[in-house]
Amino acid sequence: MKGADPFGDQVSSSDSSFSYDYEDSVLRRARMYQEYMKVVHMPTQHGFVIPFTSWVGFAASMKEFYGQPLYYLTNVQMKKFDQIRLGADNEDVPLDTIIVSSLHC
């Protein structure tokens, strides 16, 4: 059986060397990611106040707090949360009164 290669070449899926190379590449990337995550700084501070009234502001503070960008879909979800809050009774209420305190202690 032949499959399309992203570079335009036809690749036979019955070719064992292709399968091995792909699996080796995935495993190599997974190991690299694990090594990278070992050096990522994890803050030890707990119980911080969340003085934001928007989820986008909260996401920006988390980006600054952890010193690395948030995942793309996290940012998309934060924007959706803000759109839901528009016009709600608690629109101007700081998020630290909405988020359960045990989550940020």
Image: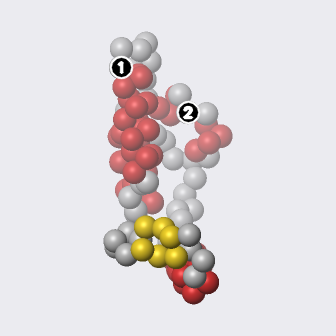
Residue tagged by mark 1? 86
Label 1 secondary element: loop
Q: Position of residue 79 (x, y in %)?
A: 37, 35
Residue sitting farthest toward the bottom? 17
Whether 40 is drawn above or below 98: the answer is below
Q: Based on the displayed image, in which of its 4 quarters is residue 55 positioned?
A: top left
Q: Is residue 35 visible?
A: no
Colouring style: secondary structure
Whether 31 is drawn above or below 79: the answer is below
Structural crowding at the residue carrying mark 1, measured as other residues with C-alpha within 10 Å and reported as few (<14), some (14–19) or many (≥20): few
- The first of marks 1 and 2 along the sequence is 1
Amino acid type of the residue that numbered disc 2 sits on in the rendered structure: Ile
Residue tagged by mark 2? 99
What is the number of callouts on the image? 2
Q: Position of residue 58 (x, y in %)?
A: 41, 42
Whether 22 is drawn above or below 83: the answer is below
Residue at 37%, 75% in the rendered image: 9
Q: Quadrant of the N terminus?
A: bottom right
Q: Nearer the viewer, mark 1 or mark 2?
A: 1
Q: Quick one: 27 or 33, which is closer to the camera? A: 27
